[in-house]
Every structure is written in structure tokens, then in C-alpha cells.
Image (tube, rainbow, N blue to C red):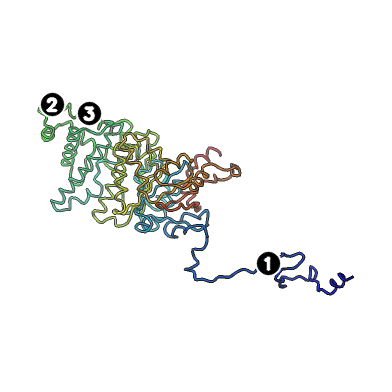
Amino acid sequence: MTSDRRRAGRPRPPAGPELTPERVAPRRGWKRGRAAHVEPGSIYLGTTVQVAGLFPFVQAGSLPAEGVPIGPDLLANELVCVDPPGWVGRLTTNPSVWIQGQPGAGKSAVAKRLCLGLVAYGCKLLVPGDVKGEYTSLVRALGGQVIRIGRGLDAINPLDSGPLGRHVYGLPAEQRDRMLAEINGRRGELLHALLATPYGLTRRPGAEESTAINTAIRLAAETQPAGVDPTIPDVIRVLRESPQSLRDRLITRDEASYLAAVRPVIAALENLCDGPLAGLFDRQTTTPVDLSQPALAIDLSPILTAGDHIVAAGLLATWAYSYAAIDTARAFGLLPGQVVLPLDELWRALRAGPGMVAAIDAIIRLNRAKGEIVIMATHGLADLEALPTEEDRAKARGLMERCDIAILLAMPVSELERVSAQRPLTASEIAIVASWASPTASGLDVATMHPGRGKALIKIGQRVGIPARLQLTAAEHRLYDTDAAMRRGRS
């Protein structure tokens, strides 16, 4: 009875319909149907400067939101941007970018996004050797110039002086002679590199052969009208005619000794003008590079099926021509801004011939001073170990080390361990990049995109890597599409 009176004297909470959102619960909560205990939260006040770094609590600050947007941070969902030229002297010491990942992971898409964004910031895009023609659509969409090298298409004269040849004859005599010597020196270096390919001598010319080549180039250039460049057939003609000035340089007293010295060189130069290379590099340049355009690409895809040796010779010629044009334009003040140089399919370029690694290495070492942003993309570091000489392999190992910005896409653990030997990676970084290399059990639906595609770990120097997902616009999906042929095969 006592308990009944106690219950009768205690007010009861209203039934369900009478409970309204406005009713405030007691400090210890309602006895039935509600949380047992609700503790009021603590409120702390501070300025945005003081509390901006509190969230996320276990993450360091992300990259500055400046430069080319890539996509959201996979951990913090913040926007991740990359700014190779803007970070120099602040986060990095040079603007070079190294992109690495297995085929289909999105290397080219990341490289093209960087190129597109940097062009929007006022840089000029120049693709010196587009082996697969992947940049053609992008360059044309930017209103730029595409030069297609192939039989029945455009040709490039390896001895072309570029814009320098069109300006040199307006200079004072002393400066003109100095510039002409520089032009002939570049011509000789390129011809030496071409002769080292399998379609030439398969080696660098010896001392006597080098003297013959350099002298023949100079004599061939002197016989051309002002403003007209010599070609490889012109050099062959001089070697065959064997003028006395050439014999004097070689110190040959009779025809037999002269022929013994130059016969291999003549045969090798003839190979560059005949057979698979006929019509590609044995005539005047048909379409000169126009550096007033916002973007340019030299498309080598028409000769891709001719074999690696043909592509190697093409890369040597187009690279030399492109860089000569850049240097000349800068010398005459015709190229004041920065230039973006994407070197996709890097392994092909490195295998183009002896000395190619040294050329790329020289570009990277000087790009900060010359305003050149080099973007190198490759499948793996194992590609660098396949170079023909130990000297080239040793230089190639340093290419990645001299890139302060590394973007790593899906790769197996074995390849990531090679990367970590040059750019230390934590166990967590290796695990997250390796997880992108193959789909999980929940990602085996063939109707969905590979779960690792477009995901990239962005490392700036020795900082902790930022994992991000590349987000493409509808226009970029059309411009960067490299799977169209595979989809046609399934249709």
C-alpha cells in the first residue's frame, strides 16, 4: 500500500502524443523510453587562425589550394592541387614532375590535366615527340598546332636551324659567325646521335669519322643560299665529292685512304635516307614549329608500326628540332613565358640512342633557370635498367631523384620497393598504392570502373604523400580517352 501511495504522489511523464520536441529532458534523462543520461557538451571559442589546423586531428595540413586542381583528398576530402612552377623555392627546389604507374592506371590523364591547367595559367605546351598521338586531341582543342611525321605526311629536316636560321643573317658579322658555328655544332651532335641508332653505325662515330661529318656539314651549309638549311643528302654529296678542304682536315693523301675513312659514314647516312626512313628526315622541314601557338605537338604515331628503331630515330630528330626552336626563341626574346614539356612513354625516349639520357638529364638540371616544366611519365623503374650502357643506366637512376614532385599511381609492391629505394615510402604509403593495383572482392563488377584508376599518391620531396582521386570533366573524358579501341572491340 505504501508503494502504491508513493507512486500515486509522484507526477508521471505525459504519454506518447503529449511528448513534443520542445519539451526539455531532465539532467539525468527520462526514466523510460529516452537516453539514460545526456551530458551537456563543452564549448570552446577561438579565432580561425588558432583553430584552423585542429581538423583533421591526426592529419598534417594538405597541399596549398593553388595551381592545377587534381581532385579530392581520399582521407580529408579536401581539394588537392599541384603547382610545379609556383612551388619552386617554397615547397620544392625544381618544377620537374615524375609520374609512375602501371598501364591503364591514369598516368597520361594526370599528365594531360597538369598540361591543360598550366596552359590556362599562361604556359605554352610543347610535346616534342608524341609517340602514340595521345596529345593530338588536347592540342587541337586548345587551338594549337599538330605536326604529323610519316610517309606522305610531314617531314622534319634534322639539320634544320629553326627560328635561329631565319634571324641569324640580320645580325652583325661577328655575332652571325658565332651563331652559325653554334647551329653547325648542334647539327653535328644530332647527326652523331642518329648514326648511333641501328639504322646508322649502331655506335657513336670515331674521331676521324666525326671530323669528316662536322666538316661536311659546314661545307654543305656554305653552299646553300642564305636562309636555306642543308639536308642529309647534301652532306652525303659533299662526302662523295671529297673536296680538298675535307681531305686536308682528314690528312688523307690518296683516294683509297679517304674512302677507307668515310665509307662507313656514307653508308650509314644513306640508310637514314632510304628504306623505312625514306621521306621522313631526308628533305626540308615541311611544317615549321610555330611557337606563337598556345600548344604544339609533334605526332609520331604514323611511324609507330614501323618498329622501335624507326621511332627512336624519330624521337631523336623531333626532340633536337623542338629544343633548338625553344632555345632560339628565348635567345631572341620570342618566348618570354614558361614551357610545359610532357615526356610520356619515357622508356621509349631513353632507349632512342646513346646520349639520350644525358640530354634529358641536362634539360632537368637547367629547367628552373630556363622556365621549362618537364613532366616525365613511365611504367616502372625497371624500364631504366634496360638501357644499353651502364653510363646511361647510372644517369637514368637519378632522373626520379631530381624531380621534387612524384605522383605514384597503382603499382605492385615489388615496384614500390624499387621506388622506395630512391624516394623513401612509409609502409602505409606502399600499402595504399599497392591496394589500387588490383580490385577487391567488392570491386569485381565488370560494369564499373577499376577502383584504383585515377587514384594517385602525391609526394612533395620527403613530405607525407597525399592520396587523391583525379576527377575529370566530361570534355576531358573525351580528350583523354585511351580505351576507345577496346570498347569498339566489345561493341
Specify the quadrant that holds the N terminus. bottom right
Front disc: 3 or 2: 3
- The residue closer to the viewer here, 78 or 240, is 78
**Marks 3/1: CA distance?**
93 Å
- Residue 197 horizontal side relative to residue 424, left or right: left
Compared with 114, 19 (above or below) is: below
User: How many numbered discs sit on the rendered protein?
Assistant: 3
**Marks 3/2: CA distance?**
15 Å
Task: Return the residue at label 2.
Answer: 255
- Residue 412 horizontal side relative to residue 31, left or right: left
Circle on res. 294: none
Name the spot of residue 192 as percent of width and height, x first: 24, 37
Picture quadrant of residue 234? top left
Element under label 2?
helix
Which sits earlier in the primary sequence, circle 3 or circle 2?
A: 2
Q: Are marks 2 and 1 in contact (CB under 8 Å)?
A: no
Element under label 3?
helix
- The residue closer to the viewer here, 115 or 237, is 115
Residue that appears at 18% across and 48% down: 179
- Residue 283 horizontal side relative to residue 74, left or right: left
Picture quadrant of residue 332? bottom left
Q: Give neighbour class at mark 2: few <14, some 14-19, many 20+ (Cα, 10 Å).
A: few
Name the spot of residue 101 as percent of width and height, x first: 45, 43
Circle on res. 38: 1
Task: Return the residue at label 3.
Answer: 264
